[in-house]
Amino acid sequence: ETGVTQSPTHLIKTRGQQVTLRCSSQSGHNTVSWYQQALGQGPQFIFQYYREEENGRGNFPPRFSGLQFPNYSSELNVNALELDDSALYLCASSSAASGYNEQFFGPGTRLTVL
Amino acid sequence: KQEVTQIPAALSVPEGENLVLNCSFTDSAIYNLQWFRQDPGKGLTSLLLIQSSQREQTSGRLNASLDKSSGRSTLYIAASQPGDSATYLCAVPDPLVGNQFYFGTGTSLTVIP
């Protein structure tokens, strides 16, 4: 069974740029959620994708957007980067069939905005 | 909106000690609660998942309990080891939406050899 993978591991961008982060869900999981974790804080829900559509969104502006592909992998796109976007971005996969019961997380992408 | 609090924020214990980490949440209409471990700069590793119908769940030296009516969960770690040093986070789903999870800020545990 393949776990959740994310790429890249680390990323450095400058303010105003755009970034794309990628996630491959665990085998058999059809739902992907994205979280932002600032230093010293718990993860905060950005949004979830199911059947290639957004299926719930947290309190994040529209410049945070995403995609899900037919193979259930997903992308998180952030436009017009701000300094406060510097964080660990976590992807979690789950199965809608089990009511999103248990989430499995990837290793994260560390984004630094200068 | 669910609010999740974890106490204490940090804990330092000598090796071999038993310890309890606490998690409280404001809305008791949850269908599960999940405990995670996070090593510095890394992703989250799932430790235990407790369904709302369960009162506790065990895995090795770890035991998690859930009291929905009081909005509390505890994670008990027996015979702590230096390798247990990490941040421990609890997460509960949004009672209405269900697929959105709220996390506490975690308890940073250091086990001293």
Image (tube, grey):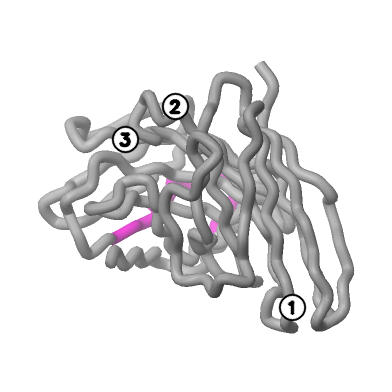
Task: Name the residue: 55% across, 39% down.
Answer: A52
Report if residue A3 is visible in the image.
yes
Quick one: A88 or A32, which is closer to the camera?
A32
| Marks 1/3 same chain | no
Local secondary structure at mark 1:
loop
The x, y position of residue B59, in whole percent, is 44, 27
Quick one: B108 or B15, which is closer to the camera?
B108
How far, Cα to Cα, is label 1 from label 3? 40 Å
Q: Residues within 10 Å of mark 1 (few under 14, many from 20)?
A: few
Q: Which residues are magenta?
A: B13-24
Left or right placement of residue A4 versus residue A111 in this view: left
Quick one: B61 or B97, which is closer to the camera?
B97
How far, Cα to Cα, is label 1 from label 2? 44 Å
How far, Cα to Cα, is label 3 from label 2? 11 Å
Report if residue B113 is visible in the image.
no
Give the amino acid at mark 3: Ile
Give above or below for A42 relative to A22.
below
Magenta stretch: includes residue B23: yes
Quarter where residue A28 is shown: top right
The label number, if any, that marks residue B50 in the structure image: 3
Nearer to us of marks 3 and 2 is 3
> Mark 1 — residue?
A80
> Mark 2 — residue?
B59
Question: Could you tell me which chain the residue with mark 2 belongs to?
Answer: B
| Marks 3/2 same chain | yes
The label number, if any, that marks residue B74 in the structure image: none
